[in-house]
Structure formats: C-alpha cells, structure tokens
Image: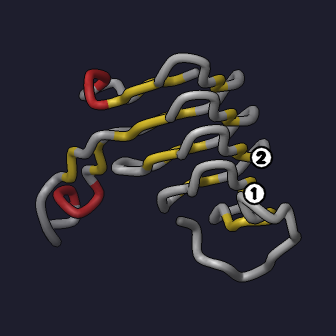
Amino acid sequence: MIIDNLYPEKVVIEEGATVAARSTILSHDESLAYTGRGPERILETRICRGAFVGVHCVILPGVTVGERAVIAAGSVVAHNVSPGSVVAGVPARPIREAERGTVTEGQEIG
C-alpha cells in the first residue's frame, strides 16, 4: 500500500478496513498548480470501517469509501462510494447497490 507522501496525516483508514497490496491512497493533487490553472488541492481521504480496497487501486484525494464498501481490483476511485456498495473500473462505477444487491450500470457513485 502507498499512502500519500506529502500529507499522510490526511489519509484515514478506519478500524477493520482492508487495503490490498499495491493500492495507492492520495490526499493531495498538484496538477492544477503545476499547470498554472489553480491551487494545489489537499483533502482528507477516508476508508471507512470494514471497507475493502482491492489490489492495485487508486483512491483520489477527498474520496470517502463508505463502511463495508468493496472496491474491485484495479479501480480508480474519483468520487465517494456509498456504504455497502461494490464499485469497479476506471473510473470506478457501481456494479451492485448497497441494499438490494442488484446489478446496475452507468450510475454515479455515492
């Protein structure tokens, strides 16, 4: 697991959460500052209690992964993930709703 190198204190991994090998959790984004288009963004990124982040995922700054949510291997998570949801892909999108367990497509995360 790789935790943001400049602001690791802004990454919160709650008790019982699992972050698998080669996943990266970021809390800052310098792209706008480097290109002269805006300021650096520094935001808390949170992996909530009981959540699972699969192998080789990237969690972008400011994202909250809800309790017991599952992030499939190789996903890039740019938006909050609702508790209990299962998301996958680049960018990550819901593949199962939290309560009903039905398969969905094209739905916004959160």
Residue 16 place in picture, x, y as percent: 60, 18
Residue 84 place in picture, x, y as percent: 68, 49
| Structural distance between the alpha carbons of marks 2 and 1 | 5 Å
> Which of the pair 33/109 is nearer the observer?
109
C-beta proximity under 8 Å, tags 2 and 1: yes
For residue 16, above or below residue 61: above
For residue 38, above or below residue 83: below
Residue under circle 2?
72
Residue under circle 1?
88
Residue at 81% over, 76% down:
104
> Which of the pair 110/5 is nearer the observer?
110
Query: The N terminus is located in which quarter?
Result: top right
Residue at 85% over, 61% down:
101
Residue at 21% over, 45% down:
42
Most distant residue in the front direction: 99
For badge 1, the amino acid type reads Ala
Instruction: Please report whichever mark, 2 or 1, sits nearer to the chain's N-terminal start.
Output: 2
Residue at 66% over, 38% down:
68
Q: Is residue 61 left or right of residue 53?
A: left
Most distant residue in the bottom direction: 106
Q: Residue 54 carries which label?
A: none
In the figure, residue 107 lies in which quadrant? Answer: bottom right
Q: In this view, does 94 lie to the left or right of 9?
A: right
Q: What element carries label 2?
A: loop
For badge 2, the amino acid type reads Ala
Q: How crowded is mark 2: few (under 14 residues within 10 Å), some or many (20 or more)?
A: some
Residue 80 place in picture, x, y as percent: 48, 57
Q: Is residue 99 left or right of residue 1?
A: right
Q: In this view, does 74 lie to the left or right of 46?
A: right
